[in-house]
């Protein structure tokens, strides 16, 4: 008895096509994610820079208070005696 085999289209090519489509979709999603993250990190960097400026202002105010407190203490000591 001889078996007759039908010629069929190889399934491998169809799977390869679908895998390539899936890979291309994945790369597109990753690229979009990277663009969004770049924008997000730029905004974070700007906010950190703004916070640094505010922090420097506060630090200068504190140093000014130190000078004021020391000067007032010295002047009070001079006039109380």
Image: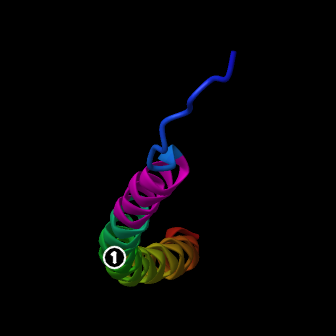
Determine the residue positioned at 48% across, 76% down.
Answer: 59
Give the quarter of the image for residue 34. Answer: bottom left
Give the quarter of the image for residue 39. Answer: bottom left
Residue 79 image position (x, y, % from top left): 49, 76
Q: Is residue 9 above or below residue 50?
A: above
Determine the residue positioned at 43% across, 67% down.
Answer: 27
Q: For the residue carrying disc 1, how many other residues have a C-alpha within 10 Å: few (<14), some (14-19), or many (20+)?
A: few
Disc 1, SS: helix
Q: Which residue is mark 1?
A: 35
Where, quadrant-wise, is the N terminus in this rendering?
Answer: top right
On the picture, is 53 further left or further right than 69?
left
Q: Is residue 9 magenta?
A: no
59 or 24, nearer to the observer: 24
- Residue at the right extreme? 1
Residue 69 image position (x, y, % from top left): 49, 71
- Magenta span: chief secondary structure: helix
Determine the residue positioned at 45% across, 62% down.
Answer: 20
Determine the residue positioned at 54% across, 50% down.
Answer: 12
- Residue at the top extreme? 1
On the picture, is 38 further left or further right than 66?
left
Residue 66 image position (x, y, % from top left): 53, 74
- Residue at the front extreme? 1
Residue 79 showing in the rendered view? no
Q: Is residue 54 above or below residue 80?
A: below
64 or 36, nearer to the observer: 36
Q: Is residue 13 magenta?
A: yes
Tally of marks:
1
Where, quadrant-wise, is the C terminus in this rendering?
Answer: bottom right
- Magenta region: 12-25
Residue 14 image position (x, y, % from top left): 42, 52
């Amino acid at each position: 008895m001889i078996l007759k085999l039908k010629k069929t289209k190889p399934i491998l090519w169809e799977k390869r096509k679908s895998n390539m489509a899936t890979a291309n979709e994945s790369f597109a999603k990753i690229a979009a994610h990277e663009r969004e993250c770049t924008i997000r990190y730029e905004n974070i960097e700007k906010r950190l820079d703004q916070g640094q400026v505010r922090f420097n202002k506060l630090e200068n105010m504190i140093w000014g208070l130190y000078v004021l407190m020391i000067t007032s203490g010295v002047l009070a000591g001079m006039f109380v005696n």
